[in-house]
Image: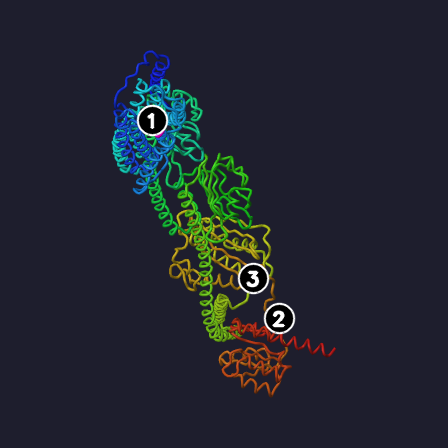
């Protein structure tokens, strides 16, 4: 905008020119006198030509620096003007040397001189900003061209001289006046318009073009209004040319002064920018940088106040974050400008500097009404705003400077503030980078600690809880959720979280589909971010998020392979967008969590496999122990059963002797009783060694437990043990030996009562049954002191006991586990977390099997028969022969297998009693000889052995299908077995007779 002062100056000059021209036009009387002055033209034109040449030289030197069209045009035209002025001097007829010169020639050189000067002003004013580079050779070419042109003009004028009308009485001819008006209305008006344009643009050099053109046009017009030589307008015409050139020279000088002043100002601005830049690099804290920017903006721009705005790209709003100078806290408190409103909003929207006056509304820079009212209330009158953007083009905000007085902003003001804005943007970018590095360092430290903790954690629940806390602390989320995929249900389940309403965690399930936030993330297998759920169109917003007031969130798949195992999600109750760094942190947490969960699951599976392996190993070790012990006991039983049989039958024979006294008979009875006791001990040992198959039949486990408790009840009541039973009423029957199961239960009850008697409090014995997969389970639990942990793996070892010497043999639990494993079941022991021990028995349902039955008993006397006794032990062999002879049988004995086959080859026998263990040919070999050579006699064989319960002997006896006498043998058992065989033979004979 042109200032009033400049308009007034122009109007004043115009008024003076109008006054002068009016005097010339209307004041003929005053202007009529003429004053012929010798050499008047040289007096005016020679100095003009010299000054014009000098100014032209200065313009061309100016061109060396600027390489512009203004300097080149003005310099060349001034040279041409000077040459034409000299031609005007040389063609004057008033000199003694020029008596023959036509006085009508000189005015045309004068007009040409004016024309060249005005054209030069017009060129410099209208085309001066254009670039016009020239070399030294080019300048010489232009100079030569000007000389040639001026010479050509002189030749042309001289050639047309004969046809030019003569000047009569000193008055110019109409043709000459026409030439003058042509110059005035073409070059003159063009130069005036160009000068006015440069003057309005505040051009320090071009502004003087207006004054020079005005002086030249004023002198030319005055002469044309009164075209007489030696008149005052004629003298003023000659004076106007050097005066105009002088004005151009003054313009050059003023430009140099202005350039010097500008250079000083630029130096001062550079110093201010340097100090401001130093202040900005002293800190990397964004808060301090913002305050420094606002403070230094006042020093750089000379403003009265400054406000730094931060730009929120998501909300498209600029918010005040710092102020300085005359800006009060009241003004910046809550100050926010929408994008495109206010000077700051427009500058950010259009990415350019914007200035405005606050005194009046500006349609180009609209302000919110309340904001501009507050600014005017604090006396702010003008504002200049620049955008602050980084090298990548990201807009950080805007810087606005305010003035308490109306201020016309120059390009220099804008350039200076923009330069400071560049420094401020770099400082902000450095601060943000430093802040980002700081956050990254903190996040890396958190992630490192998180990873270290995960390496030490093997529990999946603890991993989930740790993940939730780290995620919330690192990202500042309102809600955090860990969804794991349920393969069976085909859905995502919220397994862990923070900030959720009670009852949500563990109960919330989401289908793995694109209809939900978490489901969409799970299927797309990539990070999904939602800045504002209200504007989301990719998937529906679940009700569980709206009920929690969630407006934004980020979800990332949880997995280390192609198929994720779940989703980790963070939610916010206000619209928000995570930065790239926060996205990296969330993805890293998800990755580490997925690996930790997979590690925990593998660890849990490995532990389960190790426990199974340990149990299997324990079972194998126990089986090996029992196998070795069974082998040992089998041999011991055989060696013991032979003398026991001899002793038992000898004692029974003594009791049948009437000649003995009652005391001797009583001693024989005691011997018989102790033999039976020893026999039972041997049978229990063999049963413990798992070498006697249980006699299975359908059994109600609950009834067996009730029977065992009834038998144990007196002992439990004596030791103040309260019994609690939880027996499942619908328990199905199993195939088992009830007496062996009862033996196991009684042993467990006895051990529990013994453990509870050692405590000072009343004991509780709990017995539970329950149906399990393909079987039943029995749990016997007490609230006693429990089993020491170091003894848990030894309680089933044979002969291991914690009881004092003389109170236990250590075979009870070994016998129990042998019985249970013989039923193809399992038996385990553990300590109860509170107190006491718990024994768990699992038994399969199974199917009933037939047990090997002993021969039916018969107390009657059998017929006399021929009997062969094959036994390697001499004492037992003799006593058996004696017992059978007393029954009236004819008895023959053999000590070896070979002797037996020899006897069998010669004679027939009604009964053959065959021991399995013989020194040369064992019982199996003798049986095979009989089946091959005397097959009819095979039905008369009775096996006898102390090893009937070993696996090999048991299989052989089952395959043979003959009765068995188990050692130690009593007289009654021997006689019943012989009678049974004889009766079976009698029945066969009777059947054949019929």
Quadrant of the snapshot with the N terminus: top left
Q: Position of residue 588 (x, y in %)?
A: 41, 48
Q: Position of residue 477 (x, y in %)?
A: 42, 39
Q: Which residue is mark 1?
A: 102
Q: Is residue 904 visible?
A: yes
User: Could you tell me which secondary element the residue under label 1 belongs to?
Assistant: loop
User: Could you tell me which secondary element the residue under label 2 belongs to?
Assistant: loop
Select label 1 or label 2 by which is in front: 1
Q: Which residue is mark 3?
A: 737
Q: Position of residue 374 (x, y in %)?
A: 38, 21
- Report the Cα–Cα distance between label 1 and label 2: 188 Å
Whichever of callouts 1 and 2 sits on the residue coming sooner in the sequence is 1
Q: Which residues are magenta?
A: 107-116
Q: Residues within 10 Å of mark 3 (few under 14, many from 20)?
A: some
Q: Residues within 10 Å of mark 1 (few under 14, many from 20)?
A: some
Q: Position of residue 524 (x, y in %)?
A: 51, 47
Main secondary structure found in the magenta portion? helix
In this picture, residue 389 sits left or right of residue 812: left
Q: Which residue is mark 2?
A: 858
In this picture, residue 705 sits left or right of residue 497: right
Whichever of callouts 1 and 3 sits on the residue coming sooner in the sequence is 1
């Amino acid at each position: 905008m042109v200032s009033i002062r400049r308009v007034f100056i122009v109007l004043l000059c115009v008024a003076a020119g109008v006054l002068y021209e009016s005097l010339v036009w209307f004041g003929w009387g005053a202007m009529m006198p003429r004053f012929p002055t010798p050499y008047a033209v040289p007096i005016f034109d020679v100095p003009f030509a010299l000054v014009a040449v000098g100014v032209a030289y200065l313009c061309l030197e100016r061109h060396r620096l600027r390489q512009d069209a203004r300097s080149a045009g003005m310099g060349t035209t001034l040279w041409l003007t000077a040459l034409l002025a000299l031609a005007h001097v040389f063609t004057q007829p008033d000199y003694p040397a020029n008596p023959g010169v036509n006085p009508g020639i000189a005015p045309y050189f004068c007009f040409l001189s004016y024309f060249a000067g005005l054209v030069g002003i017009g060129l410099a004013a209208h085309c001066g900003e254009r670039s016009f580079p020239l070399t030294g050779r080019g300048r010489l070419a232009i100079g030569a061209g000007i000389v040639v042109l001026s010479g050509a003009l002189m030749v042309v004028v001289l050639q047309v001289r004969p046809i030019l009308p003569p000047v009569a009485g000193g008055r110019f001819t109409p043709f000459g006046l026409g030439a003058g008006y042509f110059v005035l209305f073409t070059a003159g008006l063009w130069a005036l318009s160009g000068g006015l344009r440069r003057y309005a643009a505040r051009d320090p050099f071009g502004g003087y073009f207006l004054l020079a053109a005005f002086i030249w046009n004023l002198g030319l017009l005055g002469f044309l209004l009164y075209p007489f030589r030696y008149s005052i307008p004629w003298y003023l015409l000659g004076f106007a040319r050097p005066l105009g050139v002088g004005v151009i020279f003054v313009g050059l000088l003023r430009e140099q002064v202005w350039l010097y002043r500008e250079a000083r100002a630029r130096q001062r601005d550079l110093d201010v920018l340097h100090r401001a830049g130093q202040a900005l690099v002293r800190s990397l804290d964004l808060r301090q940088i913002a305050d420094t920017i606002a403070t230094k903006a006042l020093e750089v721009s000379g403003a009265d106040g400054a406000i730094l705005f931060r730009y929120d790209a998501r909300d498209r709003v600029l918010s005040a974050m710092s102020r300085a100078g005359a800006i009060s806290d009241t003004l910046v408190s809550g100050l926010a400008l929408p994008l495109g409103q206010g000077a700051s909003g427009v500058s950010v929207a259009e990415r350019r500097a914007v200035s405005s006056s606050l005194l009046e509304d500006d349609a180009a820079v609209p302000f919110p009404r309340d904001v501009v009212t507050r600014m005017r209330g604090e006396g702010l009158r003008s504002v200049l705003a620049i955008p602050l953007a980084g090298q990548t083009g990201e807009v950080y905000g805007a810087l606005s400077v305010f003035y308490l007085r109306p201020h016309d902003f120059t390009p220099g003001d804008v350039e200076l503030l923009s330069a400071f804005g560049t420094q401020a943007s770099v400082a902000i970018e450095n601060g943000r980078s430093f802040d980002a590095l700081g956050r990254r360092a903190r996040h890396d430290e958190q992630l490192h600690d998180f990873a270290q903790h995960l390496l030490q954690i093997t529990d999946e629940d603890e991993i989930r809880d740790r993940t939730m806390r780290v995620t919330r602390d690192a990202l500042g989320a309102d809600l955090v959720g860990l969804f794991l995929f349920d393969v069976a249900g085909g859905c995502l389940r919220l397994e862990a979280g923070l900030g959720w309403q009670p009852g949500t965690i563990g109960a919330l399930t989401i289908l793995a589909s694109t209809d939900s936030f978490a489901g969409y993330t799970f299927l797309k297998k990539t990070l999904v971010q939602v800045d504002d759920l209200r504007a989301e169109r990719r998937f529906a917003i679940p009700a569980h998020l709206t009920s929690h007031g969630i407006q934004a969130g980020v979800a990332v798949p949880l997995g280390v392979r192609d198929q994720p195992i779940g989703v980790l999600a963070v939610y916010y109750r206000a619209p928000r967008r995570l930065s790239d760094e926060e996205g990296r942190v969330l993805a890293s947490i998800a990755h580490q969590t997925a690996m930790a969960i997979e590690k925990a699951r593998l660890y849990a599976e490995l532990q389960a496999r190790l426990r199974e392996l340990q149990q299997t190993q324990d079972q194998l070790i126990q089986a090996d122990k029992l196998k070795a012990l069974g082998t040992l006991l089998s041999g011991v039983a055989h060696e013991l059963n032979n003398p026991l049989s001899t002793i038992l039958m000898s004692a029974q024979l003594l009791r049948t002797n009437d000649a003995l006294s009652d005391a001797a008979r009583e001693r024989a009875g005691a011997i018989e009783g102790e033999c039976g006791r020893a026999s039972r001990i041997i049978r229990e040992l063999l049963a413990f060694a798992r070498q006697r198959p249980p006699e299975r039949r359908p059994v109600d486990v609950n009834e067996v437990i009730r029977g065992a408790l009834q038998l144990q009840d007196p002992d439990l009541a004596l030791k103040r043990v309260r019994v609690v039973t939880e027996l499942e009423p619908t328990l199905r029957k199993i195939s088992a030996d009830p007496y062996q199961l009862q033996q196991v239960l009684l042993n467990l009850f006895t051990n529990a009562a013994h453990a509870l008697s050692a405590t000072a409090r009343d004991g509780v014995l709990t017995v539970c049954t329950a149906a399990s997969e393909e079987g039943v389970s029995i749990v016997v639990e007490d609230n006693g002191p429990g089993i020491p942990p170091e003894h848990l793996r030894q309680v089933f070892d044979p002969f291991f006991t914690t009881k004092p010497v003389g109170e236990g043999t250590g075979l009870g639990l070994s016998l129990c586990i042998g019985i249970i494993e013989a039923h193809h079941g399992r038996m385990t022991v553990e300590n109860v977390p509170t107190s006491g021990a718990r024994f768990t028995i699992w038994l399969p349902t199974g199917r009933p099997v037939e047990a090997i039955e002993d021969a039916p008993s018969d107390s009657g006397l059998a017929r006399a028969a021929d009997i062969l006794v094959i036994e390697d032990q001499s004492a037992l062999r003799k006593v058996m022969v004696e017992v059978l002879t007393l029954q009236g049988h004819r008895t023959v004995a053999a000590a070896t297998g070979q002797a037996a086959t020899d006897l069998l080859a010669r004679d027939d026998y009604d009964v053959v009693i065959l021991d399995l263990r013989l020194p040369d040919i064992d019982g199996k070999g003798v049986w095979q000889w009989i089946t091959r050579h005397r097959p009819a006699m095979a039905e008369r064989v009775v096996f006898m052995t102390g090893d009937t319960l070993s696996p090999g002997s048991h299989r052989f006896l089952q395959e043979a299908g003959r009765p068995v006498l188990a050692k130690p043998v009593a007289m009654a058992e021997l006689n019943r077995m012989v009678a049974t065989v004889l009766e079976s033979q009698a029945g066969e004979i009777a059947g054949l007779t019929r």
